Amino acid sequence: MTTRAQALIPITIAAVIIGVVGLLTLPSDSKIESVAFPRGTILVDDVALEVQIADSEARRVRGLMFQDQLPYDQGMIFVFEEPSIHSIWMLNMQFALDIIWFDQDGKVVHIERDVPPCQTVLEIATCPTVASISQAVYVLEVTSGFVEQNNITLDSVLTIVSI
């Protein structure tokens, strides 16, 4: 007859192994829950937003992970050195996002609405990425519904006030 301890030992070992593997597969810069981002101000058309600035690889990897919410007048802007097809991964997000890609002139090149978060272990294994269809230099993440609420379209323009 199997004792309770004999049954729990393999389960405990399996849980530890899964946890260690999970931690090892996360990018190292995203393991810390608190990262300081510089702040700035942008306009999308005539809508002002206070933005957290992700202007380094470590900040871009970290993104909005673990943040509980983002008011409609705030966002995160990813700033890249070169125009390219940039993808966004919703790992450890707590809420859905609208994502807007801009070229070097501030013109919208792609919009993804209501991109769902990946929060659970099962979702993380299959967490999709979303990418622009054209080259971009800036990617703006805002709370889902922002695009519709503010009538943001492919004709919209990004103006950088301070970043």
Image (cartoon, helix red, strand yellow):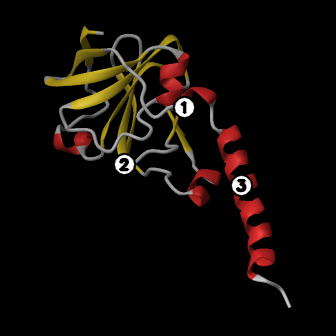
Residue 24 placed where, x, y %? 70, 39
Residue denoted by label 2: 96
Residue denoted by label 1: 30
Q: Is residue 102 left or right of residue 146?
A: right
Query: Which one is earlier in the sequence, the residue at label 1 or at label 3?
Result: 3
Examine the rendered structure and indicate whether residue 52 appears above or below residue 147.
Answer: above
Q: Residue at x 45, y 38 (%)?
A: 65
Residue 118 placed where, x, y %? 50, 51
Q: Residue at x 16, y 23 (%)?
A: 48
Residue denoted by label 3: 16
Q: Residue at x 63, y 32 (%)?
A: 27
Of discs 1 and 2, which sits in the foreground? 1
Of discs 1 and 3, which sits in the foreground? 3
Of residues 122 and 30, the one nearer the viewer is 30
Q: Residue at x 42, y 25 (%)?
A: 35
| Mark 3 surroundings: few (<14), some (14-19) or many (≥20) residues within 10 A | few
Q: Quadrant of residue 5?
A: bottom right
Marks 1 and 3, how far apart at CA = 20 Å
Marks 2 and 3, how far apart at CA = 30 Å
Q: Is residue 125 left or right of residue 1?
A: left
Residue 126 placed where, x, y %? 62, 53
Amino acid at circle 3: Val
Of discs 2 and 3, which sits in the foreground? 3
The outermost residue toward the right is 1
Q: Quadrant of residue 156?
A: top left
